[in-house]
Every structure is written in C-alpha cells, then in structure tokens.
Amino acid sequence: MRWFLALTAAVAVERIAELAWSRAHERRMSRRGGSVVAEPWYGVMVALHTGTLVAAPIEAWLRGAAAPPAARAIGLAGLAAATALRIWTLRTLGDSWSTRVTHFAGGGRRVVTSGPYRYIRHPNYLAVILELASLPLAGGAWLTALGASALNALVLSRRIPLEERELVADATWRAFMLPRPRLVPRLARA
C-alpha cells in the first residue's frame, strides 16, 4: 500500500508542477494575443483529476488487499505509457501547452505539427485517458478506474469540441490536423 500511496503522491506533485507551468504559458500566450476561453467543464475536469488522486489510494486501502499481479502490471505499464506520451506531448508543445483552452483573435497561435501531433490531434488527452484508468488499476482501485474513466469520457466529450472550435479557426491547423484522428492513431495509412 505504501508504494501506491507514494506513486499517487508523485503523480500529484507532477500535476501541481504542471499547473504552475501552465499558468506561466498562459501569461506568455496572453502576450502573443491569446485569451483564456470560459470553460463550463474546467472545474469538473480539475475535480475529476483531484478526486482520482484522492479516491484511488482510499479505495486501495479499504480493499485491504494488493491488486492482483496482472492488474498491477497492466496498470503500471499503462501509467508508464501515459507518462511517456505526456512528456513527449508537453516537450513538443513547449510554451504553447496549457490546461486551459486559449483563443487567438488575430494570429499568434503556434500550430504544432511534429512529435505525437504527426499521428493524432489530441495526444495529451490520450495520455490522460490512459492515466485515469491505469493509476487506480495499479493499486487495485478498479471502481475508481471505472468511475474516473466514465466521467473523463463525459468531460472530454464537451472539452474537445470546445477546443477544436478555437483551433479550427487557424487555416494551418485545419489543413494539417483535421485529416488526423482525434485520439487513436491509424496503424497503417491507406
């Protein structure tokens, strides 16, 4: 149980650092003409991520038994994949990454077409999907994994269209990204 609590705490510390990084990027984007878009579901998204980090160790503790080895292995492998994809995505985006959707009225948006964006439109959301399922599963908190995944699906069903309404205003983004799938890369090109 201690290892899972430590892992969850490490993920929480990473998220707090990402929020500080996001706010710094929002200020930079503001200087390039960007403004944060009002998002009705942003608070739900924050609560979901926070709640998962709290609920997973509580559920694991209440269960009182370690996760089955296969579930732990799948959870840890999924979390490692999510973390690697998140790092690749954030490094690729640089100071264009933020937890908030940003509107650019007259240019100023930097369209990223390299890294994981060569394959899908929203690699960070794919990383989040993997993480919200995998982290709880690694600790045997399968109810948290299911609940977080279901709520995340609802949040992303609202957030991705909102974000894409802003992005599609950019001709470069439209030309490069619209032909790509949102979340699941194509295995072979036709």
Image: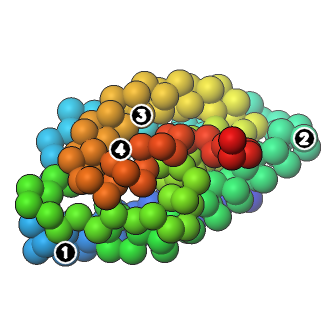
Residue 66 image point, x, y percent: 83, 41
Q: Residue furthest front?
A: 190
Quadrant for residue 138, please give it.
top right
- The CA span between labels 2 and 4 is 30 Å
Badge 4 crowding class, 10 Å Cα cut-off, few under 14, some 14 to 19, many 20 or more, is few
N-terminal of the two: label 2 or label 3?
2
Does residue 20 appear anywhere in the picture? Answer: no
Taking the image as shown, residue 145 lies to the left or right of residue 27, namely: right
N-terminal of the two: label 1 or label 3?
1
- The CA span between labels 2 and 1 is 44 Å
Camera-near label (4 vs 3) is 3
Nearest the eye: 117 or 80: 117
Q: Secondary structure under badge 3?
A: helix
- The CA span between labels 2 and 3 is 28 Å
Quarter occupied by the C terminus: top right
Camera-near label (2 vs 3) is 3
Residue that badge 1 annotates = 28
Residue that badge 2 annotates = 70
Q: Secondary structure under badge 2?
A: helix
Q: Is residue 8 above or below residue 72?
A: below
